[in-house]
Image: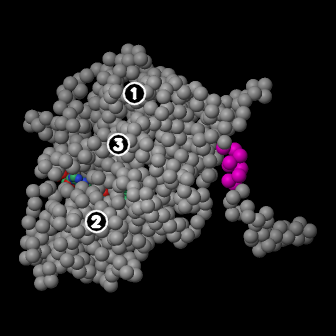
Amino acid sequence: MKGVDHLAHERNKTEFDVDAMKIVWAGSRHAFELSDRMARLVASDPAFQKDGRIRLGRKELFKNTLRKAAHAWKRILELHLTEEEAGWLRNFVDEPSFTDLHWGMFVPAIKGQGTDEQQQKWLPLAYKMQIIGSYAQTELGHGSNVQGLETTATFDPETDEFVIHSPTLTSSKWWPGGLGKVSTHAIVYARLITNGQEHGVHGFIVQLRSLDDHMPIPGITIGDIGMKFGNGAYNTMDNGVLTFDHIRIPRNQMLMRVLQVTREGKCVKSNVPRQLIYGTMVFVRQTIVADASTALARAVCIATRYSAVRRQFGSQDGGMETQVIDYKTQQSRLFPLLASAYAFRFVGEWLKWLYTDVTQRLQANDFSILPEAHACTAGLKSLTTTATADAIEECRKLCGGHGYLCASGLPELFAVYVPACTYEGDNVVLLLQVARFLMKTVSQLGSGKKPVGTTAYLGRVQDLLQCCCDVQTAEDWLKPSVVLEAFEARSARMCVARAQNLSKFENPEDGFAELSADLVEASVAHCQLIVVSKFIDKLQQDIPGKGVNRQLQNLCYIYALNLLHKYLGDFLSTGCITPKQASLANDQLRSLYSQIRPNAIALVDAFNYTDHYLGSVLGRYDGNVYPKLYEEAWKDPLNDSVVPDGYHEYIHPMLKQQLRNARL
Ligand SMILES: CCCCCCCC/C=C\CCC/C=C/C(=O)SCCNC(=O)CCNC(=O)[C@H](O)C(C)(C)COP(=O)(O)OP(=O)(O)OC[C@H]1O[C@@H](n2cnc3c(N)ncnc32)[C@H](O)[C@@H]1OP(=O)(O)O
Ligand SMILES: Cc1cc2nc3c(=O)[nH]c(=O)nc-3n(C[C@H](O)[C@H](O)[C@H](O)COP(=O)(O)OP(=O)(O)OC[C@H]3O[C@@H](n4cnc5c(N)ncnc54)[C@H](O)[C@@H]3O)c2cc1C
């Protein structure tokens, strides 16, 4: 049987309406139609082809990215695409570039932290790409510790300007994307100094390069920080280094929604909390959660299709060997990742809703849910990116040797994805923020303050500390209330135990530092609970399409029960479940794998990825893996000649030498 036939046969086994699932995955019919149209537009345009990208040298690679970004912009204008359509188009071009920072951080920073006048001045320029912006926060010496940044912005009342300066080597801006070679402007984060007094870190709009000849403004030193992990991958991005030598900017280029500096250099606080200065990070972390499901789904799509095509062992009487997807070990590694892709999709959808809600409340001067929005975006960004990076690597292993070939698409996907665990906040640093939020919530329980939102369960802490899981059969694990209670009890018990340990320290900060590894575990438990509960919420919605809800239920329980299995130590040590109940959960998990098996290919088809976007010979829609892999190998430049360059210099003399030695 040819690869082509393998997948056709697989698709015939499907027990649900794939088109309906495509809409669930996309979020709505509108989102599906729009993303589908943009994916096809990009895939059919030769200017966006990705072949051979990993073989390009840095300069060629970078220029190629500039070409694609310019072509994308041209198409956006020609076709009068909406902002939403343009975002999808850039997404399917599938190449990190300066435009990510421009649209993803520079524009949102002005929107979130700029006054109305600042928005009116700068946004039209940015929307027309008459200026290109970056987000310059991190420095050589400090990234996580934002309040430790060293760049200064000193107000000069004589000229009504700020003087932006890099006082030390470690104050050099380091990492901002798009900065190295492209951006004309940046939001630069610096310590505000007026009348000799410091007022914390704030954002400033600074022009970096001439809009005529692209040369740096005198006093600015700027360049690329060098090659990063992997071929191709994130090297399409010009992450930059930037220093200022007393650069002057007008006073009205400080983003002043949180704090205004008057003509006299007086600081006037608005009613907006200081934390709004960190608002752009909250926005981007929320988009990163949605992106995690996309990246994870790509890897899972490749590994699932290839697992159905690939056969090893089990052949009897010269018959066909077993499809590797039928091995229980393969299923127990692959299907939880498939379930995670769906889980992250739905939690990402919910987080987007939460972010929109927070934004509306902020506009109405209601800042009450900002701490929760921060904790949720930080925690879920950390949880989903860590899981996705690990999952891409697991998918590579699931594809055996061929997964290691660049033609599988997985090495590049891993290299491009893995920095998500670091950018927008190192994942451990972010979990520590969640821990602070959780410990604060627990400490306020006694005062009668009722926790709301994602921590509402902590309001039932007394019940959760005592509850006993009443699972008696494997089927009992298919009750949403049972699963939810087990996850709530585990998280509540971990939080309370950490809070009790913290209270033994005289100085809470010392305690927090000493117990930080334990605290991070409590944050993970809390974030996993959020993902499970949002998946369960999704199942309660009226989801049309034959068999769709059933598949989603199976995926939801796979996600939850696999976590229960993986973190069994937590569940057992906190007494949430018994070893017998854990064993029943495992029995149920195996049964769920069998139920998902015939639908696996259709569940990844529902992601609706084009072959162009997947960029993988192993993950091709038609399953025609071997002939294409063979074809691909011959495209390698090493195969341009039969006898390699270097033969005459290095191989031939060696062989001759051996011959001479042999004769002696
Ligand atoms: C349309 C297209 C879309 C495309 C989207 C593309 C996206 C692009 C994707 C990828 C490109 C990669 C680009 C990468 C960019 C970057 O990496 S930018 C740099 C990001 N840097 C960080 O994330 C730094 C991490 N550090 C921090 O966030 C903070 O410094 C800190 C760790 C939170 C510590 O802050 P601080 O020193 O102030 O410490 P605390 O005392 O702990 O906090 C004080 C109080 O503030 C609250 N807080 C902290 N952060 C926030 C926040 N973000 N929002 C709201 N509130 C916050 C904290 O809870 C404390 O509150 P409390 O006093 O009540 O306890
Ligand atoms: C590809 C990429 C793109 C980026 N793009 C941008 C950009 O566009 N703009 C921008 O401004 N920045 C950007 N960054 C920088 C990024 O935001 C920072 O690297 C990130 O916030 C982590 O900070 P750091 O490098 O200072 O790590 P560090 O804080 O130095 O982390 C090093 C180690 O120390 C640990 N650690 C640090 N603090 C603590 C603590 N309090 N408790 C326990 N452990 C701790 C961390 O967990 C980590 O293991 C980018 C980075 C990358 C990799």
Q: Is residue 43 above or below residue 458?
A: below
The residue beneath circle 3 is: 348
Q: Assign the C terminus to one quadrant of the image.
A: bottom right
Q: Residues within 10 Å of mark 1 (few under 14, many from 20)?
A: few
Q: Is residue 501 left or right of residue 347?
A: left
> Which kind of residue does numbered mark 2 sit on?
Pro
Cα separation between marks 3 and 1: 21 Å
Residue that appears at 39% across and 43% down: 31
- Residue that label 1 marks: 544
Q: Earlier in the sequence, mark 3 or mark 1?
A: 3
User: In the displayed image of the protein, which residue is found farthest to the top?
Assistant: 472
Displayed quadrant of residue 8: top right
Predominant SS along the magenta part:
helix
Residue 335 pos. (x, y %): 50, 33
Q: Given the image, on which type of amino acid does mark 3 rest? A: Gly
N-terminal of the pair, mark 1 or mark 2, is 2
Nearer the observer, 93 or 245: 93
State the CA–CA distance, disc 3 to disc 2: 29 Å
* Closer mark to the observer between disc 3 and disc 2: 2
Identity, as a three-letter code, of the amino acid under mark 1: Pro
Report which residue position mark 2 lands on.
Answer: 124
Side of 525 where 631 appears, left or right: right
What residue span does the magenta drawing correspond to? 625-633
Q: Give the image location of residue 373, x and y in percent.
A: 24, 46
Density class for disc 2 (Cα within 10 Å; few <14, some 14-19, many ≥20) is few
